[in-house]
């Protein structure tokens, strides 16, 4: 797919960008990514694989074992804008005398920069219909992510996480004996998620004052908006890309060659990106243009349009200019006639033949006439003559 940004990569669940990111962060190892996931509240992620001999870069796309409660807790860290809290199914323990023996402490620590958490939450809240269908919850703005794992190229597990600033819900669909299932649609359980999350927010959390309609995260200071996309304050547009101007052909939308006429050439600024792994260069160009191919429309032996002799007749101060124009390889497109640098005719022309223009002249002496004709491939021809006024 070429160079794509993180938002699009996540929307399409593309594996390669995640693998490359893990490779870059860990200099070839997924260890920093795994450790980051563990710090977020999924402490046993990849433990089985680690004890069995190790894990690879596939850990960046979920190729490790995990506990669902811990996975949900890791996403809760995103929902808390990067603050991690330990999971507990017991809030408080008291004895028969009412003495508190154990109590969960609502303590947290910042393990992810709030800017990063906000950007990820924003990306995962996109609801453009696409590969995974609609992941929204009626009346509640949420973020969501799906995932699948396969067995013998057949789907075995389907995961869905859906969360808001108030609540996180996770669902796993699969068979307890690890046998494959009959669908690869990772949003298969979304109807359940949607109903539960809608009810929990509107009928429970809203009434308890823990959520209100339209609630979303407060945007951290420093986040940049560049070309409609969000970036953290430390991101530098030039750190991984550069710009340069390339001359394109207007007709083919490909790179101009020495056969491309000057009138068909246009300079366009393109973005050059160096792949951090392969070091290969990719060029991002405006839609419709191709920086990897050369102009294949124009040929060096194309016949250019031609202009015959320029003549004129007059009636008093009015002079009528006459000129014959002839198409070459390509059909004619436009003509312009000027007298002393002032345009007196500029119009479309579609066929060979005589063209005329009338001008009023009252100044004695020679007046310069210039005729320029252009065809549909931007080949041009220009001829000059003069009108003598006595």
Image (cartoon, grey):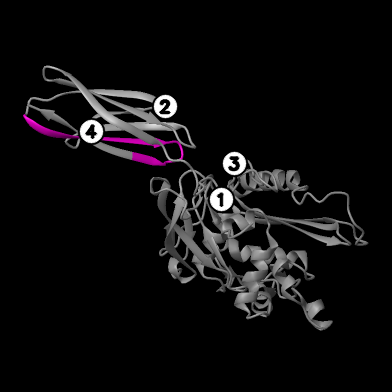
The residue wearing badge 2 is: 352
Question: Which is nearer the eye, 179 or 105?
Answer: 179
Q: CA distance from mark 1 to mark 3?
A: 12 Å
Q: Position of residue 226 (x, y in %)?
A: 43, 57
Q: Is residue 60 above or below residue 12?
A: below
**Regarding mark 1 in the picture, which secondary structure is present there?**
loop
The label shown at residue 211 is 1
Q: Position of residue 305 (x, y in %)?
A: 41, 37
Picture residue at 70% right of the left edge, 71% below the top: 42
Between tags 2 and 3, which lies in front? 2
Q: Does residue 165 show up?
A: no
Which callout, 3 or 4, points at the residue further toward the start of the chain?
3
The residue wearing badge 3 is: 139
- Quadrant hosting residue 177: bottom right
Between tags 3 and 4, which lies in front? 4
Between tags 2 and 4, which lies in front? 2
The label shown at residue 338 is 4
Question: Which is nearer the eye, 100 or 152?
Answer: 152
Which callout, 1 or 3, points at the residue further toward the start of the chain?
3
Picture residue at 78% right of the left edge, 81% below the top: 54
Q: Is residue 380 magenta?
A: yes
Question: Which is nearer the eye, 254 or 39?
Answer: 254
- Which segment did they paint magenta? 364-381
């Amino acid at each position: 797919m070429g160079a794509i940004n993180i938002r699009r990569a996540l929307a399409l669940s593309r594996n390669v960008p995640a693998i490359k990111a893990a490779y870059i962060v860990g200099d070839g190892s997924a260890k920093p990514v795994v450790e980051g996931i563990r710090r977020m509240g999924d402490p046993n992620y990849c433990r089985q694989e680690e004890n069995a001999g190790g894990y690879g870069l596939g850990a960046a796309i979920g190729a490790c074992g995990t506990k669902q409660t811990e996975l949900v807790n890791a996403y809760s860290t995103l929902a808390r804008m990067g603050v991690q809290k330990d999971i507990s199914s017991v809030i408080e323990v008291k004895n028969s005398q009412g003495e508190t023996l154990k109590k969960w402490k609502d303590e947290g620590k910042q393990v992810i920069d709030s800017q990063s958490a906000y950007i990820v939450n924003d990306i995962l809240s996109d609801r453009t219909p696409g590969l995974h269908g609609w992941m929204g919850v009626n009346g509640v703005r949420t973020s969501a992510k799906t995932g699948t794992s396969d067995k013998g190229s057949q789907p075995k597990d389907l995961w869905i996480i859906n969360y808001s600033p108030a609540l996180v819900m996770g669902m796993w669909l699969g068979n307890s004996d690890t046998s494959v299932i009959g669908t690869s649609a990772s949003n298969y359980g979304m109807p359940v998620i949607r109903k539960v999350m809608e009810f929990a927010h509107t009928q429970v959390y809203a009434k308890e004052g823990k959520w209100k309609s339209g609630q979303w995260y407060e945007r951290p200071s420093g986040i940049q908006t560049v070309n409609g996309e969000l970036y953290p304050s430390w991101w530098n547009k030039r750190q991984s890309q550069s710009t340069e101007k390339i001359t394109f052909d207007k007709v083919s939308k490909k790179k101009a060659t020495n056969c491309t006429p000057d009138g068909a050439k246009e300079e366009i600024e393109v973005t050059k990106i160096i792949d951090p792994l392969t070091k290969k260069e990719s060029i991002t160009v405006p839609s419709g243009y191709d920086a990897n191919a050369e102009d294949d429309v124009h040929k060096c032996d194309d016949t250019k349009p031609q202009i015959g002799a320029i003549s004129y007749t007059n009636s008093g101060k009015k002079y009528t200019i006459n000129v014959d124009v002839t198409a070459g390889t390509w059909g004619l497109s436009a003509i312009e006639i000027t007298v002393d640098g002032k345009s007196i005719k500029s119009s479309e022309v579609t066929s060979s033949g005589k063209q005329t223009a009338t001008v009023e002249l009252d100044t004695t002496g020679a007046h310069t006439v210039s005729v320029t004709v252009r065809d549909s491939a931007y080949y041009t021809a220009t001829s000059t003559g003069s009108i003598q006024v006595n």
